[in-house]
Amino acid sequence: MRFIDSHAHLADPAFDGDRDAVIGFARDSGAVAVVCIGESIAAADRAASIAAAYPRFAYHTAGVHPHDAAHFDAARDIAAIRRHVEAGAVAVGECGLDYHYDHSPRDAQRQAFQAQLALAAEVDAAVVVHSREAEADTKSMIADAAAAGVRGVMHCFTGSHALAEAALRAGWYISFSGIVTFRKWDDVALLRLVPDDRLLVESDAPYLAPVPNRGKRNEPAFVPRTIERLADVRDSTSDALADLTADNARRVFGLAMAGAYR
């Protein structure tokens, strides 16, 4: 199985002690690329360094997470994200809306999200979106962004069928994480709803390790567990699903990878 982890927080301090070993383990487990998420400007700076150390394997993004939207400064932060994209970041984000935790006021979340969507349209970059308990606003903002030509990824998707369908109508991608291996996950229909050409897989490392590693620090090397679960419910094979999700990740992020991955 050769796969792409479309969303991993490898810049997180959880990996400071053994990041190189984690990346080596991912490669040994079949990873041909990992998208390192910059959910803050500081995280994006660290993710860019990881991408530079592992060219044509690690790629990075840059954005401001909705949890931090209260401190978002449009002039400062959009300029910083733009610099990252110009230097090779493959997407804007992780950005979006989180009305579950409400760590930032909702107006501030919407303003930060809108500014990042506008930048993605301007620089022709994909956008990586976090949405939790904010479906109405997320659907509205996705529709407006798609009309402006923005392509995007709904990451670690656990939302409703209606939100998934809205994202798919916009031409966006849906990414599933290790949550789909948890015993409590019972929405098999959602896992079948996403067309083959819009499906992605991710670790969201260091969070949400799949069964049988649940409760431990997550790693990109564990993504095959998610692939196996999806392949099972979609009547596919793990190799075929790994290939198609890798194709999709290369397409949406514009990844220029070393050699063929098949």
Image (spheres, rainbow, N blue to C red):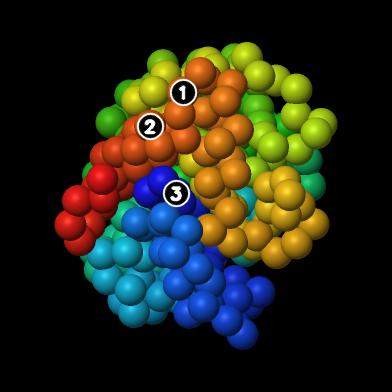
From this viewpoint, which residue is outermost toward the bottom?
A: 17
Task: Give the image location of residue 258, x and y in percent.
Answer: 20, 61
Identify which residue is drawn at 17% across, 57% down.
259
- The tag on residue 6 is 3
> In this figure, which residue is indicated by the disc labeled 2?
240
Which residue is at the far left? 259
Disc 3 residue type (three-letter): Ser
Circle 2 SS class: helix
**What crowding class fits label 2: few (fewer than 14 Cα within 10 Å), some (14-19), or many (20 or more)?**
some
Q: Is residue 116 above or below residue 133?
A: below
Query: Where does residue 7 sit, x and y in percent of width and height?
Result: 49, 52
Secondary structure beneath label 1? loop
Query: Mark 2 and 1 residues: CB-CB less than 8 Å, in contact?
Result: yes
* Left or right of 209 on screen, residue 198: left
Left or right side of 260 for 59 = right
Q: Which residue is mark 1?
A: 236
